[in-house]
Image (cartoon, rainbow, N blue to C red):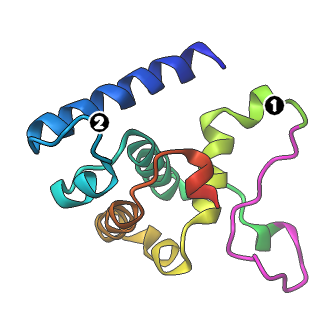
Amino acid sequence: MGVTQLVSDEVFKLQKRAIRIITNSYSSTSCRNLFKEQNILPLQSQYVLSLAVYVAKNIDDFTINSDIHSINIRHKSSLYPPLLRLTKYQKENYYAGIKIYNCLPPKIKELSGKIKHFKRSLKKFLLHGSFYTMEEFLD
């Protein structure tokens, strides 16, 4: 586990503690519903929102599958991830942004040209899911 992961785990624990204080809940209360009730995104969901909005704003800097493949493929509107073998590069924001964007529901991806609508719809989706981890979001 890297330093960044340790720091984000600590920040997430503080975020859960703060939401329990705000809602006057017990320390053993699950925060998942508290986040939804207070319309607050958990830390990882905020990360997903930030990266997805960055990708949507800079969509021209990314390659779309239909630009690479001349045949009609199922994921033609998805972004083409660069072929990287090193895990170090796969964890960078550029690659993570592509991965996150490709996992978004098609209805949200369609709004990427209208950033305000895109952000609003994505935040609503993330609030509903209240994702605690990247793996939870990607599944």
Q: Is residue 103 left or right of residue 80?
A: left
Picture residue at 31% right of the left edge, 67% below the top: 124
Indicate which disc, 1 or 2, sits on the residue closer to the N terminus: 2
Residue 10: image tag: none
Q: Which residue is mark 2?
A: 16
Q: CA distance from mark 1 to mark 2?
A: 30 Å
Picture residue at 49% right of the left edge, 54% below the top: 52
58 drawn magenta:
no
Within 10 angstroms of label 1, few (less than 14), some, or many (20 or more) residues?
few
Q: How many marks?
A: 2
Range shown magenta: 68-84
Q: Secondary structure at mark 2?
A: helix
Where on the picture, by quarter, is residue 13? top left
Q: Amino acid at mark 1?
A: Thr
| Image quarter hosting the C terminus | bottom right
Residue 87: image tag: 1
Give x and y (percent) for residue 55.
52, 52
